[in-house]
Amino acid sequence: MDAVMTWLNDRNQFHIWLTSLITGSFVVLTAFGSKPGFSDIGQTILSIALVLLLISILCSLVCVWSIPTWKFRVKTKLITDAASMARELAITAWIGVICFVAGLTLGFIGNVPW
C-alpha cells in the first residue's frame, strides 16, 4: 500500500509539472506567436495547435483531480487491484502527452511565415 501511495504522489507531482509546462507553452504561443484564426492556413494550424494544448491541459488536470480519489480508495482498502487505476491514469496521461507534443509541433508550424 505504501508503494502505491508513493507512486500516486509521484504521479501527482509529475502531472502538476506537466500542466505548468503545457500552460506555459500555451501562453508563449498566444502571447508571442501569430494570431490564431481561420482566414489562412497558418492561422488554422495555430488554432488546431491551441485546441490540442487545451485538450492536453484537461487530460493532465483529470489525472491530478482523480489521484486524491484513488488515494482515498487505496487507504480505505476499497480497491485491492491497482491495475485499473494504473491503466486509467496511463491512458489519460498518454492522450495528454500526445496532444501536447502534437500541439507544440503544430504551434511552431503555424508560426512559420507562409
Image (tube, helix red, strand yellow):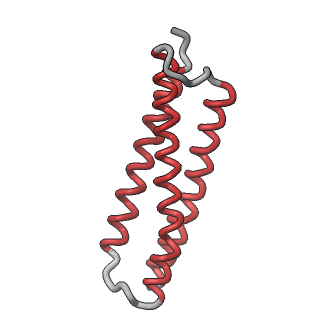
Total marks placed: 0
Position of the N terminus, as image quadrant, is bottom left
Q: Residue at x 30, y 73 (%)?
A: 83
Q: Residue at x 36, y 84 (%)?
A: 79
Position of residue 59 measured from the top left corner of the image (x, y, whole percent): 46, 54
- Which residue is at the front of the view, 47 or 94? 47
Q: Residue furthest top?
A: 114
In this rendering, position of residue 34 left or right of residue 105: right
In this view, the residue farthest toward the right is 31
Q: Residue extending furthest front?
A: 39
- Residue 61 in picture, x, y percent from top left: 53, 58
Whether residue 6 is situated above or below residue 27 in the rendered picture: below
Query: From what the image shows, is residue 108 above or below residue 89?
Result: above
Percent of width and height locating residue 103: 47, 35
Q: Residue at x 49, y 71 (%)?
A: 67
In the visual, does 27 lie left or right of 63? right
> Eyeballing the image, is 5 above or below 59?
below
In the image, residue 56 above or below residue 113? below
Q: Which image quadrant for residue 22?
A: top right
Quarter location, residue 98:
top left
* Quarter of image, res 112: top right
At x 54%, y 23%, the residue is 37
Which residue is situated farthest in the bottom direction here? Answer: 76
Instruction: Tell me where residue 32 appears, x and y as whole percent.
Output: 68, 26
